[in-house]
Amino acid sequence: MSTAQALSAPQNALVKMGLSRDIDLALHLPYRYEDETRIVALRDARDGDTVQVEGTVTDNHVAYRPRRQLVVTIDDGTGACVLRFFSFYPSQQKALAVGNRILARGEIKGGLFGRQMVHPVCKPAGGELPQALTPVYPTTAALPQAYLRKAVVSGLARADLSETVPAPLLPQFGLQPAWTLREALAFLHHPGPDTPLAALEDRSHPAWQRLKAEELLAQQLSQLHSKRERDRLRAPVLRTRPGGLHEQLLAALPFALTAAQRRVGEEIAADLARPVPMHRLLQGDVGSGKTVVAALAAAIAIDAGWQCALMAPTEILAEQHFRKLVGWLEPLLAPLGRSVAWLTGGQRKKERGAMLDALASGEAALVVGTHAVIQEQVQFRALGLAIIDEQHRFGVEQRLALRGKAGSGSGGAHDGEGANEAPESPGPLEPHLLMMSATPIPRTLAMSYYADLDVSTIDELPPGRTPVVTKVVADSRREEVIERIRAQVDQGRQVYWVCPLIEESEALDLRNATATHEELAAALPGVQVGLLHSRMPAAEKKAVMALFAGGRMGVLVATTVIEVGVDVPNASLMVIEHAERFGLSQLHQLRGRVGRGAAASACVLLYSAGDNGRLGETARARLKAMAETGDGFEIARRDLEIRGPGEFLGARQSGAPLLRFADLASDTGLLQAARALAPQMLDRFPEQADRHVQRWLGGKSEYLKA
């Protein structure tokens, strides 16, 4: 019999919930408490209160109208109360027999027929009352509260809760020294009856502060350790040179860089000139000009005799980058006998073979593509710089695979002038890594989950971008929106109409987009209305995008495949259908497809309320934020408030420990203290630092290193 089979159902449930170590059980905290320490007289109980009463059963019968139910009446001498059970067992009916004295705990409600409790928790009266509040833990159907409570008590007793934060460092957190980790956990599992529930629920109690501080410290230690490990690796030294490719590209660009683009370009160039791998996140709002910054970084790598790879999550985005990079770099590379390669999954075998050969020989200085770039058969002569766009869409494994494509690492990929020599290194060289994101990361998130990254921010838009007016419109006004589209097309403008992806069914997505396409084609005679969705063959997608980009198609109905990377300056109106189904950062990305030219642009968020005619609270907050601001950083801040960190981390979080106790919005002070403390602890108390990370993160810290 296997170990898994030998375990009972509750034991299996514990393992599935990640509660396999004693410390995991000790750190599994209640989400609420029940007060079973006192008995309230019925005359003193107020409607809506959850109370425990003690009384004698005076009536017990099964009623059949309006539905079958067990009705029990108890009296405590100060008043009577009816207990109703809509599902019950014979044993329960017997335990509540007339004459029995019982404890009943539940919410008191007044009504036409007097006071009542529905499905209260009942047990025989007598015996001592608990001395502490009763914990209620997050659990699953296979794991009863009673079993989990016992497991937590024994885990708490067995766990090694010796102090890992050195005493000299604790005052820097501003914590009360009276609360050790052991005391904080013992208290939070079984707080005394006089503890204010508000301080437990809002996590402001000193015991909670102790736990949040330790959790944030573990995260900061893990991130700092991985950053230091990476700083021990070696990368090619890539320097700019007078009159080199970098200067030539700057001179050839048909526009001047913004001050922000110049600043981040210099930060990246300084990183590339160091012998340790760059690990930098380039963030900037939609349309801020990240691609040209990436092109200048690629020019430095290529001029130094190394190759560069740019990987994007979708073919449309990859092709957008490819077109721009070919336009800027090919004229400069051709005289050197170098080229820009293109790699995607849908390529013909012959074309793909030619690209692979060009990469392996070093003739291709730069490759642009999708996940195809990291496939096993792709071999570089010497990869010096890897660029990942929309990095949160890629998993840890995919980013590691691209970093592992370093090639021979000799520094002589191209024997042209200016090839920099690679430093002496005991092992293969790591490529520099530049990650790009149009979803700006709020500062507190950058300080915590991206603490191991250097962050560069393009915080201004290029001149000529027009502000986009955002309107929130109910689906009942759909006809007015179609009229607005007709007016835009009559003025020679173009329009996007985006339909949501319905995760459960690609067929539904298709039907939704196809029906909208047919509706708009019928409503707009004489206008070419195109359709673009994820299941179309690549060649067909390409043809549709070419018609729209060339101005020959007036309206493009699409699923979110156009979310990033589509640049049509003549498009002035974006309609997002079922806008309530989209995340805030995704709505902002979609809105960024318009306002790219001189024409006044607008984004219509078409929403459909639920069956009750009302929008959910989260959806309302998102749409309100979109209407109120066009600033990507403000959008990101509100998205963090609404949805929490997961949205920003994307695939990086697969297994990464999202904070369980600390809250990035309200615990900034503790986060800053943890950041300051982590390097001191790693330098002065390395063994305790290691124990601390193991206690809080176990093996999960590996996920934070990519």
Image: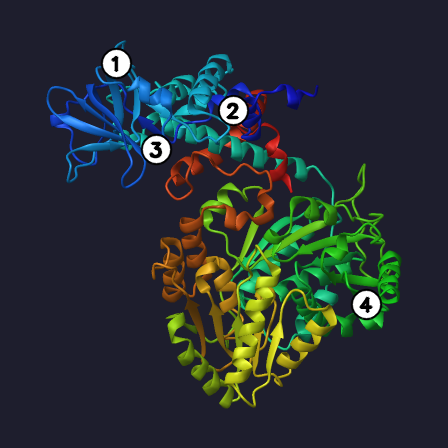
Disc 3 marks which amino acid?
Answer: Arg
Q: Nearer the viewer, residue 286 or 491?
A: 491
**Element at label 1:** loop
> Does 400 appear above or below 269?
above
Q: Is residue 544 left or right of residue 453?
A: right
Of mark 3 and mark 1, the one earlier in the sequence is 1
Helix, strand, or loop for circle 4?
Answer: strand
Q: Earlier in the sequence, mark 3 or mark 2?
A: 2
1 or 4: mark nearer the eye: 1
Is 506 in front, or is 293?
506
Which circle's residue, 4 or 2, is located before the other in the chain? Answer: 2
User: In the rendered image, which residue does mark 2 sit on?
Assistant: 24
Q: How is the image coloured?
A: rainbow
Residue 677: in sight, yes or no? Answer: no
Residue 658 pos. (x, y %): 51, 39
Give the class, few, some or many, for how many residues have Cα within 10 Å of label 1's Cα (few <14, many ≥20). Answer: some
Name the amino acid type tagged 2. Answer: Asp
Q: Quadrant of the C terminus?
A: top right
Q: Position of residue 111 (x, y in %)?
A: 17, 39
Q: Quick one: label 1 or label 4, which is nearer the N terminus?
A: 1
Residue 125 shows which numbered tag? 1
> Which residue is the site of mark 3?
203
The quadrant in which residue 470 appears is bottom left
Circle nearer the viewer, 4 or 2? 2
Q: Nearer the viewer, mark 3 or mark 4?
A: 3
Which tag is nearer the camera, tag 3 or tag 1?
Answer: 1
210 or 11: nearer the viewer:
11
Q: With respect to residue 569, does 61 lie above or below?
A: above
Would you name the residue on which mark 4 appears?
A: 339
